[in-house]
Image (cartoon, rainbow, N blue to C red):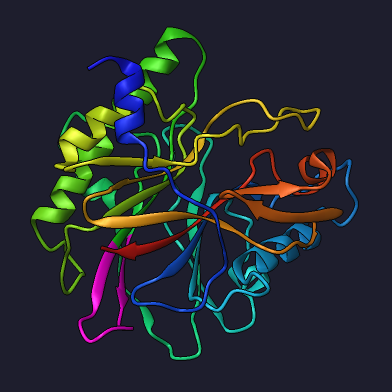
Amino acid sequence: MNRLNWFRGALLVATATLLPSRAVADVLVVSQNALHLGQGSRAVPNYIPNKNIFIQSLARWPGNSLPQLTFLQEVMTQASASAIEPTGGTVHFGELKGTSTYLERYGNILVNDAGNHLSILCHVDTASLLPSGVSIQRPPDASLIRDATGSTPRLIWFLNFHATFGTGSAGLAARRSEIGEIGNIIAQLRAAVPAGCPRTTDNAVVLGDWNMDATDASFRTLAANAGFTRLGFAPNEKTSLNAQGVRASRYDHFIWDDSRLQVTLAASPPQPLCGTTARFTTGVLTPSSLQSFRRNCSDHLGVAAVVSVR
């Protein structure tokens, strides 16, 4: 199969949706690289408190009637969970990750619906699942989610990941190796109940900042290692911003087994964010001013989708 045909077959063409009314096992899921959350900027007054407000607003999107899960990358040791907690929400920070003096954490925020249907059963630091000799700079944090909307509760693993970044062929090879290894982590989560968790499931979504275009062959390796029947990935748009606030690279994606899960890219009404206004357009956070967003909040545009079990 040539690359173009594979691309067409592997990519779920996810249609945009205005944030919908609740259906069985629907969850609005947002992923955001928070660009050193908790650290300041000498060039921007009140940078820390204003960015905390951005995260709060991101985690409870106006007009959304679904339970919402927001996953964060680049949560620094200075970040405060209470400072980003939205009304009615709960915040979890994982362990510091890194193989050098640079360390960051993963974070997630749960805002439930009125029926309190969604719950997080456990969190797993997947560093404990890596075999001897295998290195991932920031092993994913995995959260097992239970949705009790329907008569039969549904379970989904969400893995939050920030891939290593490096230049040249060595950096590219390291990223490809990590991405393939994520599939082996998923296979382990699917095969056995991890320590500290009551159950497991074959349903898994990986999200985050991959520092890699989703058409790269390493994602096929991930799918094969994970045991996915049909690879789904979306969006695959330019989400990283350079210093001038110009879209640069296709880095932020949802990756899933399309035979088990439906992932539909979200659209939303605008709200004030980061010195401008922003909305989700076909799954990508789209500010009116990219320059204002880059200056005040992040060098990545968040991505959002409605996730449900088929």
Residue 149: within the magenta? yes
Residue ID at (77%, 40%): 294
Q: Is residue 205 visible?
A: yes
Residue 112: within the magenta? no
Q: Is residue 251 left or right of residue 242?
A: left
Number of marks: 0
- Where 82 sits versus 13, above or below? below
- Where 165 sits versus 55, above or below? above
The boundaries of the magenta stretch are 143-156
- Where 257 sits versus 150, above or below? above
Q: Is residue 201 left or right of residue 102?
A: left
Taking depth in this image into account, of 93 and 62 the one nearest to the observer is 62
Q: Is residue 109 left or right of residue 254?
A: right
Q: Is residue 135 visible?
A: no
Most extreme residue toward the left is 191
Q: Quadrant of residue 268?
A: bottom right
Residue ID at (40%, 71%): 26
The quadrant of the rendering that contains the C terminus is bottom left
The quadrant of the rendering that contains the N terminus is top left
